[in-house]
Amino acid sequence: MAEREIKFRGLKRFQIFSGEIKQVWIYGFYLKRGTYGDPGPQAHIFVYENGYEGYRVDSKTIGQFTGYRDTASVDIYEDDIITFGEPARVGVVEHLNGAFVVRCGKERLPRLLGNLVSQGVKVIGNRFEHPHLLIKKKRGALK
């Protein structure tokens, strides 16, 4: 049996001394756990670097690695925005009924990500940091 890599990412937001809000992606394994003083279990991504270190992340941003990489060998995660095919189409990676699929705009049926990889998939962003990539412009108007 082939071993597959199971990993997650989540977005950690924090405020620096100047008051500015920064954000960074944390990659590792996902665990929902509570700590002293928390109102309940919180989403954490754990990273192994000289021992395990857990980082609280925004639970809405947690996405699993799909097992696929784009044409530039970039890992593809849930909620990534990708382009594929000729002419280039734009879609969002989702997890649906045990499979990773790509949903393009208002299309009713999503496409299996595994079937699209051979069409030159490229990660161009994600829906949390680059939602503007999902807005299609046509003749000067937003659609």
Image: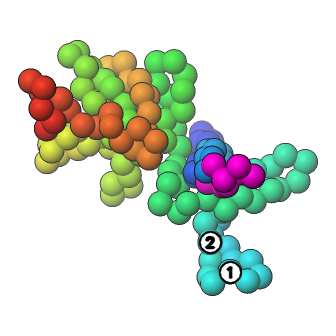
Q: Nearer the viewer, residue 86 or 17?
A: 17
**Farthest residue in the left direction?**
139
What is the quadrant of residue 3 in the picture? top right
Q: Residues within 10 Å of mark 1 (few under 14, many from 20)?
A: few
Q: Up-down: is 35 above or below 118?
A: below
Quadrant occupied by the N terminus:
top right
Question: What is the magenta range?
Answer: 13-20
Looking at the image, which residue is at 67% across and 73% down?
Answer: 33
Q: Residue furthest right?
A: 50
Which disc number belongs to residue 38?
Answer: 1
Q: Between 90 and 39, which is closer to the camera in this rendering? A: 39
Across and down, in percent, residue 112 comes to 30, 39
Residue 136 sits in which quadrant? top left
Say which amino acid is labelled 1: Asp
What sort of colour scheme is used for the picture?
rainbow
Q: Is residue 51 above or below residue 40?
A: above
> Along the horizontal axis of the image, is 122 left or right of 136?
right
Q: Residue at x 38, y 24 (%)?
A: 121
Q: Is residue 131 left or right of residue 143?
A: right
Task: Decide whether residue 14 is among the magenta residues.
Answer: yes
Q: Nearer the viewer, mark 2 or mark 1?
A: 1
SS at circle 2: strand
The chief SS type of the magenta part is loop
Which amino acid type is marked by label 2? Answer: Gln
